[in-house]
Amino acid sequence: MNYFLVLEKRPKDFMPINIGILTKDDLHNYTSLQSIDDFTRKYLEEDIKKMIKDNNLVTEDYLEGKLWVINENKYRYKLFTKDVNMSLDTFLLENIDNKQIMNKFTNIYLKYSNDNIERLKEAIKNKEVNVILQILFTLDYEKIRNIYFYLFANCK
């Protein structure tokens, strides 16, 4: 499935942004969620909009809109920017003793996978952050990303 960085002027009115123009790198293919995240996480949303404006990629009315990543089915994904700066390993290290947060972590993990759940619960119980991360990183990138954004929004 292909993904696109877009500006949304109004609901379902998207203008795709050619990241290759922003980076001056037309050889790199920015059609995966991870490749778009690799680009956007280096900047604040305002910086990306300024780059878009400086390259005359959209009209002013689109610049008032919201940046998203969408897939071919027009499903929206939050933008992974510089100000979304939580590290999963640091998050786990800081919260491994917090049963409420670790329960939230387990529940969001269960939303995306039942694989290794007993091993995950055991690792949480034994406070084995490396094992927790190993289990988490068996998931595909989109699932890890969704878990990350949930934790970032709900467990600070």
Image: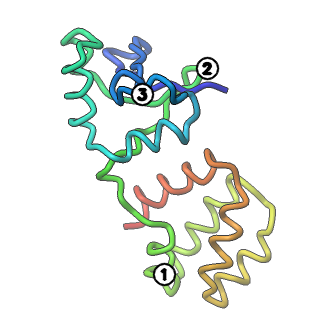
Tell me the kind of residue under disc 2: Asn
Number of numbered callouts drawn: 3
Kindly state the secondary structure of the residue where label 2 is placed: loop
SS at badge 3: loop
Looking at this view, is 17 or 106 the one in front?
A: 17
- The three-letter amino acid code for the residue at tag 1 is Leu
Residue at 66% over, 87% down? 125
Whole-Å distance between the Cαs marked 2 and 3? 26 Å
Disc number placed over residue 20 in the picture, else none: none
Earlier in the chain: of badge 2 and badge 3, it is 3
Q: Is residue 84 above or below residue 36?
A: below
Residue 25's disc is: 3
In percent of width and height, residue 31 lies at 56, 27
**Relative to residue 92, is residue 39 drawn left or right?**
left
- Is 68 on the left-hand or right-hand side of 99? left
> What x and y, as percent, mark residue 28?
51, 30
Hey, what amino acid is under mark 3?
Asp
Q: Position of residue 120 (x, y in %)?
A: 72, 75
The mark that comes first in sequence, 3 or 1, is 3
Q: Quadrant of the C terminus?
A: bottom left
Question: Residue 93 has which mark?
Answer: 1
The spot of residue 95 in percent (x, y) is 47, 79
Task: Give yes or no for contact between labels 3 and 1 (Cβ–Cβ under 8 Å).
Answer: no
